[in-house]
Image: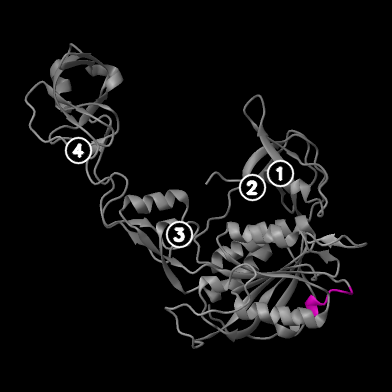
Amino acid sequence: MTAIFQPAAATNAQTLTTTQVHQKLQALLQPLGAVADIDTVTLPDALDRVLAADVICPVNVPPHDNSAMDGYAFAGSKLKSVQPNPRLTLRVVGTALAGAPWHGHLAAGECVKIMTGAVMPEGLDTVVPHEQVTVSDAFVELDASNVPAGANRRLRGEDLQQGSVALPAGQRLTPAALGLLASLGLGQVSVRRRLCVAYFSTGDELLNPGDAPREGAIYDSNRFSLQALLRRMGAKVLDLGAIPDEPAALQERLSQAASLADVVLTSGGISAGEADHTRAMLQSMGRVEFWHITMRPGRPLAVGLLAPVAANPYSESACSASTISVKSSQNQSNTPSTLRPAVLLGMPGNPVAAMVSFLMFVRPALSLLAGERAAPVPQLQAISSERLRKRPGRTEYLRGVIELNAQGQATVRTTGPQGSGVLSSMVAANCIIVLNDERGDVLPGESVNVLLLQGLI
């Protein structure tokens, strides 16, 4: 990524709506563009990678007309000859198997036994399922009124036609997309380099799991939940641990992170507390804005560009857990070619607020930087099964459980206490209830918007 770095003086935090935050993020990140480096990987290694270029179909899919059912193939024109008597009797003269086509010519009143996926023999266009026929020696009898001409036949190129775009650039490669690439006979694909994200938590009160408890301290959960969210997006994560509230330590870790990664993600240290040194430090290192968002949970967000550093080329192994050194890949030059800023995204320290801020703002921002053509996550409608108290003027994101009632309607309820530190509520939730700025209290039976948290693929 390339961009011109323009340091800015410290400014007071802006108060923004969630819509304005999305707009400002788009305006800041769009000029940077996506990561430019391209990798060629095999299909097993391509899961969750982002396509670097359109994939053009080298063949038709399917490559030939074939049967969609196990049954008997015949010419559909025979159906007209049996009117008004709907019964049709055909003699079986051969068998077509998937991968073993039947070659020959059929006389009047003949058919071929055929398996699913087998090539349709020349001149045949209709398949009757085997369960719809009566078999007697070498003959089958069927009710022609139940079988339209052309039934149960897949046409050549019906799925994808040769020369068409099978998958567009920016497509994230899901299991279904990998299967489609395999169906084209492609064993490898060009993808964008994984986005490299350096993460660290801030706070004197943080303990690592396994540390002995001490008074006033808490275990650092954000480090693990947020890094897991990053890995779910296919990003390479550089784990820089937890940093105490010491200006020198913060500056060193920020400089280190900015030199190694495309994005620096932090949690904690961006509120107005006296011990929050991140604000002043960030503004001394780059063009950074501090936003107060009219939302709950959450509110503080730091967004900006850190001072540019030499764009040291690195392989994917250079950005892996607990790795802090820069390594050169064999197919890249060691000479810095351009200067770029590292994108900074600083989130609140409360565990739920951090996760919600990630899902609502960080995730779409990272998708853009990764080059992904990601559509907004659709919001569904569900009936609230309880009263929800809501103050107009801010967006609220409630952890919820969506389920079907006895009438088959989608209903939703909260997980209980909605404090921004109640991380167990995120475990219990399968959706987020979205109450927009202008909305007030919600009564039982009223519809609300929900975002599903889990997907099948």
- Which residue is rendered at x = 74% and y = 79% of the image? 282
Q: Nearer the viewer, mark 4 or mark 2?
A: 4
Q: Amino acid at mark 1?
A: Ala
Q: CA distance from mark 4 to mark 2?
A: 45 Å
Q: Nearer the viewer, mark 1 or mark 4?
A: 4
Find residue 373 and report its horizontal and vertical position in percent. Answer: 49, 60
Q: Amino acid at mark 4?
A: Ala
User: Judging from the image, what secondary structure is the residue with disc 2 in?
Assistant: loop
Q: CA distance from mark 3 to mark 1?
A: 31 Å
- Which residue is rendered at x = 39% and y = 49% of the image? 179
Instruction: State whether residue 394 appears in this view.
Output: no
Q: Are marks 2 and 1 in contact (CB under 8 Å)?
A: yes
User: Judging from the image, what secondary structure is the residue with disc 4 in?
Assistant: loop
Q: Are marks 1 and 4 in contact (CB under 8 Å)?
A: no
Sequence-first tag of 2 and 1: 1
Give the side of residue 53 with respect to residue 448, left or right.
left
Residue 287 image-quadrant placement:
bottom right
Classify mark 1: residues with Cα within 10 Å, few (<14), some (14-19) or many (20+): many
Q: Which mark is on residue 453?
A: 2
Above-or-below relation of 457 to 311: above
- The residue singled out by tag 3 in the image is 45
Sequence-first tag of 4 and 3: 3
- Which residue is rendered at x = 7% and y = 23% of the image? 108
Above-or-below relation of 91 to 377: above
Find residue 357 and report its horizontal and vertical position in percent. Answer: 71, 60
Q: Amino acid at mark 3?
A: Asp
- The residue singled out by tag 4 in the image is 100
Sequence-first tag of 4 and 2: 4
Give the side of residue 264 with respect to residue 376, left or right.
right
Q: Which residues are magenta?
A: 274-280
Sequence-first tag of 1 and 4: 4
